[in-house]
Amino acid sequence: MNTFPDLAPAVPEIFLAVSAMGLLLLSVSGGDRRMPLVCWLAVLALTVTGVLVVTSPSDNAITFSGMFVADGFSVFIDVLILIGGALTLVMSPQYLKRENAPRGEFPVLIVLATLGMLMMVAAGDFLSLYVGLELQSLALYVLAAFRRDSIRSTEAGLKYFVLGALASGILLYGSTLVYGFTGSTNFTAIANSIAANEAGPPLGVIFGMAFIAAGLAFKVAAVPFHMWTPDVYEGSPTAVTAFFSVAPKIAAVALLTRVMMAPFAGLAGDWSQIMMVLAVASMVLGAFAAIGQRNIKRLMAYSSIANVGYVLMGIAAGTVSGVRGVLVYLAIYLAMSIGAWAVILTMRRGAGLVKDIGDLSGLARRQPLMAAAMAIFLFSLAGIPPLAGFFGKFYVFLAAIDAGMYTVAIIGVLATVVGTYYYLRVVKIMYFDEPAAAFETPPRAASAVAFVTALFTLLFFAFPAPIVAMAQTAAMALFP
């Protein structure tokens, strides 16, 4: 009997792991002077991995004794994660050079974190889920504290590490409860055990699911597990914050979706209520807490919390259309968020990067193209048609209404109205306030990322069908 696992479904992850080891050796042997080369080679590695993901067998291929699942859902999310990581690396060399931190381990950590995310999304077992989650988390802890000479960066890394370890412990405790009452850590076996119990699921399984949901809610920064987000976003290097805002968040949302839909499909009535509470709390707090922010990074942190609330609304629906809405929203959020952070990376004067919203005063007169790009991202985040953000919200609201979640949908609409205020306030500062001192010439890489993502955000209404169709196919993979 051949017990050797089928490696074909895991070829992208294997390639990325080997690439990470090669990049590590190159960065160590060449020193910091090779950082730009390592960055661009990392972009190449992520690009090749994306090609392998798209071309590898993805028709619900299961390997490693059920621990690894390659399906349409994982392919869709993997591509988004890889795009987020690659765009971050494209913007990083010039940023690190200007910040006097051109260390070669930066791109290696980004690649290792990305590898952990791919493993998370493809997990078919709580053991492989935890391995992928910790590989991602350990790299992210180091990235948050990457500026060792900065008290804020060190504080951000420490806060993220302590709270992340707590969340991992909660997740592990929930997994052990589920294992104790079902006898398995495999998603399919857990689902079968729950379905076979005619008397209803044991109370221990429900408690375990609640702990697992709480642990994953920390990773997506849902209220009330959001407390780390503003401080970590503000204290981390800006390029790292840009990465935090997209790839790890997309991976965590995808993981939460798979865990709720696969092993706990039979408990939808229970976890749907949890998701609704988290969604409402995140939308409301994200909308109101951002109003008083003066730091652009903290504003974006609360904006991301509000956006998680809209995504959780689609998960709470527990339907194919709900998951489709989540995936469409994540694809659009990737473009909006990374584009906004590309503009923030250009906010530099002689003393370094500036982070106050007031520093954007009169940007439209100094740098009209950057101001226009930022306005597009902010209007899109506010959900104003016909920009891409409107369609993201449209699909999750539609799924919520179809699932009968009328109260949640109404609260979501009201939170969107409140959120529009602080987005428009930034636009008003850029276009109507007296010009502040001019920024330095923006880096070409960040400008290119801002231009491409702004174009996607602006013109999405003309070609939504391909992304919506791919999201529909990916969502159906979770509903065999």
Image: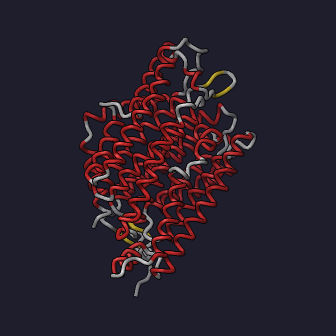
Where residue 139 sits: x, y (%)?
A: 61, 54
| Residue 163 relative to residue 399: left or right | right
Q: Out of 62 and 258, give the one closest to the viewer.
A: 258
| Residue 148 relative to residue 70: left or right | right
Task: Please count the marks in the image.
Answer: 0
Q: Out of 66 and 19, give the one closest to the viewer.
A: 66
Where residue 54 sits: x, y (%)?
A: 35, 55
Image quadrant assignment for residue 272: bottom left
Q: Residue furthest bottom?
A: 1
Where residue 418 sits: x, y (%)?
A: 44, 33
Q: Quadrant of the N terminus?
A: bottom left
Q: What residue is shown at x 69% (from left), y 34% (from top)?
A: 100
| Residue 23 relative to residue 159: left or right | left
Q: What residue is shown at x 59% (from left), y 52% (from top)?
A: 23
Give above or below for 283 relative to 23: above
Where residue 463 sits: x, y (%)?
A: 25, 37
Give above or below for 475 relative to 62: above
| Residue 306 relative to residue 351: left or right | left
Can the viewer see residue 353 in this picture? yes
Image quadrant assignment for residue 146: top right
Q: Quadrant of the C terminus?
A: bottom left
Can the viewer see residue 453 in this picture? no
- Colouring rule applied to residues: secondary structure
Give above or below for 262 relative to 450: below
Q: Out of 305 and 161, give the one closest to the viewer.
A: 305
